[in-house]
Amino acid sequence: MVEGHDRYPYSAITKRPDYSWPGGKRLAVYIAINVELFNFGGGKGSLIAPPGQGDTPSVYSWRDYGNRVGFWRLLETCERLGLPVEGQLNAAAYERCPDIPDALRAGGHEIVAHGITNSDSQGDLNEADEAALIRETTEIIARHEGAPPAGWMSPWLAETGVTLDLLKEAGYRYVLDWHHDDQPVWLTTRAGPILAVPYPIELNDNRAIIYHKATAAQFADMVIDNFDEMLEQSAGQPLVFGLSLHTFVIGQPFRLRQLRRALEHIAAQRDGIWLTTPGAICAHVEGLPRGTVPGS
């Protein structure tokens, strides 16, 4: 017998009600830029370092390059191409590099809560401590942005058995931690439903390049192939194409040059797709008739 869960039931994508995105579009496209802060000399972030080098200044500074350089190159590229972005923001950024959230705000981009730092995981916290982490993160963002964020992505995508319950109770409307579908799906919590907006676990530079050793050109090809295939598939069902980028990985110049090729390919199709953010996807789904989206 396979152990299961009660967050969502099985549902075949080919057997669901049809709907469209705004303007009759069939493919929703969003770009997630991960803005992450790490502790010097330790913490969970050291797991992506070369063996034996997790506590070295070189690895810390490699990651810090993303906030000092990589983020700005990525944002400049996306804005030049007219591509909205969503910043998954460690709340420590407001103290350590406040011009990053300032730039996201000035550009009209969405900010998604991403914990305090990426050196700390919530996956091993007890319920009280996890609730406190969510509350502190939310309060920091709300204090600077004038409103709490609508969406959450857990640092390292690590959840406990009550994360979804705590997020719903804290007022969150959607989460990016689950990767089981190409359409949004409502998840069950003890306080009511919360939406899972599809988030890419493989179309993710950290996974593809750092873990699976893809080259920059291979990653760009993955982005283009995934986009083209989903655009074709979306004739049958409305789909969500997400792209996950980490500033210290893809923000390196030789990788950015290849990524730009992929982003230009996507931007060239702007008339046939919905360039958007996860928050806008959530808002659209919330307005659909009950029974349209799995779990509703």
Image (spheres, helix red, strand yellow):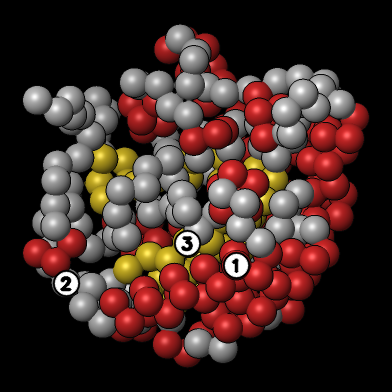
Indicate the secondary structure of the residue bearing disc 1.
helix
Circle 1 residue: 218
Mark nearest the camera among 3 and 2 is 3
The answer to whether 222 is drawn above or below residue 112 in the figure is: below
**Which is more toward the observer, 211 or 100?**
211
Circle 3 residue: 242
> What residue lies at 42% left-to-right and 87% top-to-bottom?
272
Identify residue type, mark 1.
Gln
Alpha carbons under labels 2 and 1: distance apart: 34 Å
Q: Position of residue 196 (x, y in %)?
A: 34, 47
Identify residue type, mark 2.
Asp
Mark nearest the camera among 2 and 1 is 1
Indicate the secondary structure of the residue bearing disc 2.
loop
Q: How packed is label 2: few (under 14 Cα within 10 Å), some, or many (20 or more)?
A: few
> What residue lies at 37% left-to-right and 43% top-to-bottom?
178
The answer to whether 138 is drawn above or below residue 149 in the figure is: above
Q: How packed is label 1: few (under 14 Cα within 10 Å), some, or many (20 or more)?
A: some
> What residue lies at 75% left-to-right and 67% top-to-bottom?
256
Left/right placement of residue 92 relative to residue 138 reads: right
Dot placed on the residue nearer the N-terminal end, 3 or 2: 2
Circle 2 residue: 18
Q: Looking at the image, can residue 255 be seen?
A: yes
Q: Position of residue 4 (x, y in %)?
A: 18, 29
Mark nearest the camera among 1 and 3 is 1
Question: Which quarter of the picture shows residue 106?
Answer: bottom right
